[in-house]
Image (cartoon, rainbow, N blue to C red):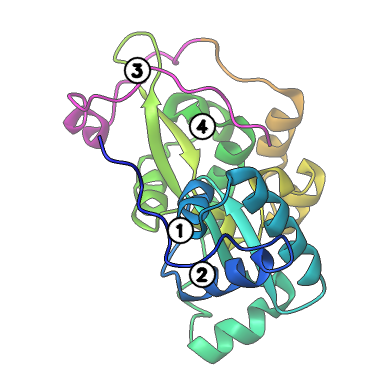
Amino acid sequence: MTDEPRPPFDEPTAEELPALLEALLFVADGPVAEAALARTLGVTPGKVRRALNEVREDLDGRGIRVQQGPEGVQFITAPEAAAAVEHFLGLESSRRLSTAALETLAVIAYRQPVTRGAIEAIRGTSSDGVLATLRARGLVERVGRAEGPGRPGLYATTQRFLEHFGLERADHLPGLDELAELLGLDDGVQQSLLDGTEPEEAPEGDVPSEAEQSEAADPDPVVQPPLNL
């Protein structure tokens, strides 16, 4: 096994590192892992994290933010500039989500990883079509399978979800009351989330959907630990 090739420049100093990270994130076409940034610059991941914090502080109050998500680090536009950016790019209509989609997103965000059966128990209605839409738009993904009959899929939010709502990190979600008001959540859905109620087992008749059945042979992990939101 060969060693990683050294970069064709001297190891950057602590003063130089933030500017170099800004340059790399600017030219990147998607999220970049901190480890990849460290390898590129020939420094430790710890130095990258400290420098990223400096970049994040320098950008506070400006039009660009540093987003840290499950896929890595990237630049995003500031949430307060969303309306202007969407209008400039002609994205106003394409970004709209239905009430059902917003409800489902809220349930997944605050309960992830969560099964379809638990989502439907909280919402009181089928979520097959909504889940398919959210997955197609890259806002949620299946991250594993729960133990139990049928091994139902477990769903969690993605980095695209953070981008859609202008969040820099997964733990930057607003409080549930604020989110419920923002999304106009049904009172029953909001109360179920506040009470922490959900079925201990999948409700009767909660069999895997056709999409889940077609993926039953996938070698997913059985359970992934909940995210800290």
Question: Which mark is nearer the camera, 1 or 2?
Answer: 1
* Main SS category, magenta section: loop
* Circle 2: residue type: Leu
Indicate left or right for 5 with 26 as reference.
Answer: left
Q: Quadrant of the N terminus?
A: top left
- Earlier in the chain: of badge 4 and badge 3, it is 4
Q: Are marks 1 and 4 in contact (CB under 8 Å)?
A: no
Per the model, the C-alpha gap separating discs 1 and 3 is 52 Å
Q: Residues within 10 Å of mark 3 (few under 14, many from 20)?
A: few
Relative image position of residue 182 (x, y in whole percent) = 74, 58
Task: Examine the structure image and report whether residue 187 is included in the region drawn in magenta.
Answer: no
* Circle 3: residue type: Gly
Per the model, the C-alpha gap separating discs 1 and 2 is 9 Å
Mark 1 residue element: helix
Residue most toward the front?
10
Q: Are marks 3 and 2 in contact (CB under 8 Å)?
A: no
Residue wearing tag 3 = 205
Q: Which residue shows up at 45% across the image and 46% down it? A: 140
Residue wearing tag 1 = 40
Mark 4 residue element: helix
Residue wearing tag 2 = 24
Q: Are marks 1 and 2 in contact (CB under 8 Å)?
A: yes
Residue wearing tag 4 = 119
Residue 188 picture quarter: top right
Q: Does 89 appear above or below 3? A: below
- Earlier in the chain: of badge 3 and badge 2, it is 2
Q: Which residues are drawn in magenta?
A: 201-229
* Circle 4: residue type: Ile
